[in-house]
Amino acid sequence: MITKSAEISATKTYYRIREVVAMLNIPASTLRFWEDTFDQLEPHRTPSGQRRYTPENVEVCKLIKHLLRDKGYSLEYAKKELEVYRKCPPRNDYVCKSADDALNLLNEVAKMINGNLHAEARIKAIEKWIKADHSIN
């Protein structure tokens, strides 16, 4: 059950570390460790050094927690997943206003999928070539 304190406010522009750890139910030391470990998590610092987390920072923290705690991913794998997230973050503009918008969105997704499939096919071809016997008799 999500309590009011666990929700991100639509009007709040930043959160203090104690608010974020309360939302995520994690120790402050864990959050500081994540800051050192994940490049995508860089809260703003005040002149006195206090951390200020934006709603976007909080979403990254939630994703990190999900990857590490819920999915059980290693730190290295979670870093790779976050890099993908950074390159292609979730979009809030999926509500299409016209059929053309929907087609454009589908084309974008198809290009991303197609690019991944081509990369996978190239990797498999290289692996096959490496495993093949290339000795000259």
Image: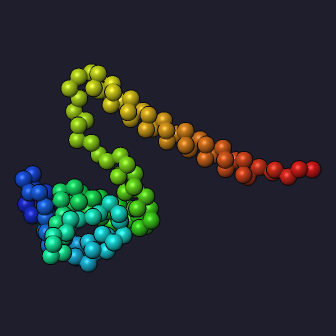
Give the image's coloring scheme.
rainbow
Residue 5, percent across and down? 9, 64
Q: Residue most toward the front?
A: 47
Give the quarter of the figure containing the N terminus. bottom left
Q: Which of these two is toward me, 125 or 4?
A: 125
Can you say whether 136 is above or below 34 in the image?
above
Q: Does residue 124 show up?
A: yes
- Residue 101, percent across and down? 27, 26
Query: Where is residue 109, by image quadrant?
Result: top left
Locate residue 105 relative to residue 57 in the image: left or right: right
Say whether residue 102 is left or right of residue 112: left
Q: Measured from the top left, where is residue 20 in percent x and y?
A: 17, 67
Residue sticking out furthest to the bottom: 29
For residue 45, what is the image quadrant?
bottom left
Viewer-proximal residue among 74 and 14: 14
Most extreme residue toward the top is 99
Residue pictured at 81% horizontal, 50% vertical: 134
* Number of numbered labels in the structure image: 0
Residue drawn 7% across and 53% down? 11
What residue appears at the point 31 percent right and 74 percent down from the top-left corner? 33
The quarter holding residue 83 reads bottom left
Which residue is at 45% across, 38% downward?
Answer: 113
Question: Is residue 39 toward the left or the right of residue 4 in the image?
Answer: right
> Would residue 66 be seen by someone viewing this image from the given angle?
no
Answer above or below: position of 24 versus 112: below
Residue 48 location in percent, x, y? 15, 76
